[in-house]
Amino acid sequence: MVGEDLTSAGLAAAPAPAVPVEALTVTQLAALGDRIANRTWAAGLPCWFWGEGVYLLGELRLAQALGRPCPARILDWFDAQVRAGVRVEHVNDLAPGTAAVLAADAGRPSYLGLVRALATWAMSDSLASRAPGGALEHWPGAVWADTTLMAAVPLGHLGAATGDRALLIECGRQLVAHAETLQHPRTALYAHGSHRGETLWCYWARGNAWAALAGVEFLELVASLPAGNGPAPDLSDLAEEIADALRRQLRALAACQPSHGAWDVLVDGWPETAGIVDASAVAGIAAAALRAAQVVPDLGDEVTTAGWRAARAALSFVADDGTLTRTSAGTVLQLVPFGYSVIRDDRLQLWGQGLALHAVAAVLDALSRGEWPR
């Protein structure tokens, strides 16, 4: 392409050596997870927003993987937010809702009412605009992969927790509508988003992580429903469609995974961002790939192998103080590929910390099933 700017790619640091397989023990992973969590709380979770939502869900997944109760500091955080008053003005404001649903089981049933208010906003407020295919828009005229995890997944968790099948179905419909807009029919990778109704085919790594994790969350929710007569036909159909989209996406990501395990910020090797690693995206994709093996039929061993390689690569970027380094900044939709080259090592990023914990938890869960690291 004429006018390519290869400056950032040329200056990209080499990937860190992957975490050795022998370091993936329960004891060492628990210590690593605690270091990441303690570092995050020391930095602070300032407000009710998407970064906090991603982080809190990651810490809860870590607690579940270690058989621990919901951390008291998470309950304290939610209690403080409720006292201060939660305002919803954007789809990203729904993100803490997933963690709130999970935390409700720890003696805070009132949290479900809070998440119900979030769901009501998403389903009926004029600010919750929708694309022609029904996808919740990040901004009017823009569908983003981020929204699958930030807004659709909280609806699914609330629906599963309360028996409201309509909300669980809405979660699935959102994932399908986003896939119809953002998943490329040939590559099966996800674009970050669309602009004024046109999909911009930049295969942003963290966008692929958001979409993959959202798909796994939905499929796990469906799998956890009481046996009875099984899920309703509409849920079964949605689950099958989402499993197919996730299967194709994860296979495509495995096929373009670099030998060192860490994808670039654009996963297809775009020249302007070649060699620029986003550790948060690698961690998120790793978690999705390892968890997907339990809910996606015929996934393929290559995906699980890619998940292990990605987890070892991502966790190698955790600094001694518990900060996940080489994490991309809060990233709006970019109109040109070069715009995705911004990596922040000067400050902790909440979503990076959360996705690192998602990866640690997924590895712990895999070890508990008797899987051997690769």
Image: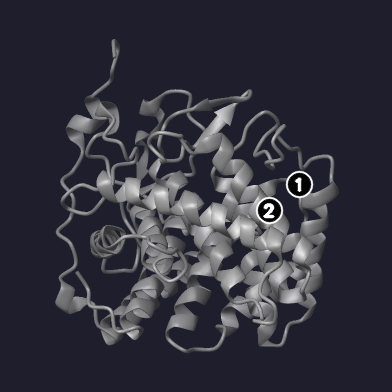
Q: Quadrant of residue 80?
A: bottom right
Picture coordinates of residue 54, whole percent (x, y):
53, 61
Q: Secondary structure at mark 2?
A: helix
Is residue 84 visible to us here?
no
Comparing 143 with 237, the one in front is 237
> Within 10 Å of the Cα at label 1, are there few (<14), some (14-19), or many (20+) other Cα atoms?
some
Instruction: Determine the residue positioned at 39% across, 64% down.
Output: 287
Residue type at mark 2 is Asp
The residue indicated by pointer 1 is 89
The residue indicated by pointer 2 is 93
Picture coordinates of residue 331, whole percent (x, y):
48, 40
Instruction: Determine the residue positioned at 46% across, 63% down.
Output: 354
Relative horizontal placement of residue 205, taking residue 179 as reference (left or right): left
Asked if residue 342 is positioned above or below residue 371 in the image, the reply reads: above
Q: Secondary structure at mark 1?
A: loop
Instruction: Determine the residue positioned at 63% across, 23% down.
Output: 196
C-alpha separation, residue under disc 1 versus residue under disc 2: 7 Å
Picture coordinates of residue 8, whole percent (x, y):
25, 31
Asked if residue 240 is positioned above or below residue 331 in the image, the reply reads: below
Image quarter hosting the C terminus: bottom left
Image quarter hosting the N terminus: top left
Residue pushed farthest top? 2
Q: Are marks 1 and 2 in contact (CB under 8 Å)?
A: yes
Picture coordinates of residue 16, whole percent (x, y):
17, 55
Comparing 157 with 66, the one in front is 157
Residue type at mark 1 is Glu
